[in-house]
Image (spheres, rainbow, N blue to C red):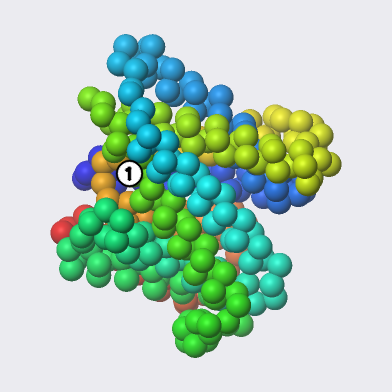
Amino acid sequence: MNLWIIITVAAAFLQNIRSSLQKHLKNVMGSTGATFVRFGFGVPFAFLYWYILIYGFGFQLPDLTFKFFLWATIASCAQILATFLLVYLFSFRNFTVGTAYSRTEPAQTAIFALILFGEKLSLGSILAICVSIIGVMMISVARSAITLKTVFTSVLSRTALIGLASGTLFGLSAVSYREASLSIDHEFFMVQSSTTLLYAITLQTLMMLLWMSIFQRDELPKILKAWKPALAVGFAGATASFGWFTAFTLQQAALVKVVAQIEMIFTFATSVFFFKEAINRLEVIGCILITAGIILLVLI
């Protein structure tokens, strides 16, 4: 099996852990604070990974160009905005529609890669993207009164458009991170990915700190009080992001995003085996389709 697939699956597993830990933090702080900890408390770990590679293993310091800073900055901003829109969706009663549309991220990533960087996909890869997206959308609506048919007929609804915008920004973020990483002329791909991660997560931390210090100062003491569980979130988040960025450096972002959908299966398994929640037919079919999409990628 290709290295980038193994790294992506590991990153998806860690991201599922990070998301579970973040849910507990929302009991003691708001959504902004819970979102911040993945960045702010992830910075020390991102620096540690970079430091070990450069000074522990003796790799050469990377030379950073304007192109790197441009695409890494675009990616960082797009990721924050995409996350904000995804969180904003939950304030709507029919947020399920929007959430389902945000899962079109792999397809939108492929479109951005084609338009901005001329990256093309094989017909097999496009089929894998479509199969996995349908699977994820089925899981998204499986526990609501909304059906997959309703989702597709609600394409112009407000929540659908917000979900699409979120997916668009996540897609832009993914291809921009890949371009930023590839713009670093270095012999070792992990130095490229760790450098991109360190810059991005530091920039995101500073932007969110500035936002909270102006608009949500009450979140800061809550974050400091919960520093121990926040460190766990930071570790899982930074390690997962290191995996994502490494995979983006090795493979087209759209294909990485297809394999990344396995996170939905991890989430689904957690709810079934740990929280003893019942399984329904749509969830089972959705998991099968996601798995089929990943298998298609492995076989092509």
221 relative position to 134: left or right = right
Q: Residue at x 57, y 54 (%)?
A: 81
Identify which amino acid the numbered label 1 is placed on.
Answer: Glu
What residue is disc 1 on?
179
274 relative position to 30: left or right = left
Say if 289 sits above or below 199 in the image.
Answer: below
Image spot of residue 182 (x, y percent):
29, 38
The quarter of the image holding the N terminus is: top left
Res 232 visible = no
Q: Residue at x 34, y 44 (%)?
A: 178
165 relative position to 85: left or right = left
Q: Quadrant of residue 110?
A: bottom left
Residues 166 and 292: in front is 166
Say if 244 sits above or below 90 in the image.
Answer: above
Residues 245 and 1: in front is 245
Residues 137 and 183: in front is 183
Image spot of residue 142 (x, y percent):
53, 75
The quarter of the image holding the C terminus is: bottom left
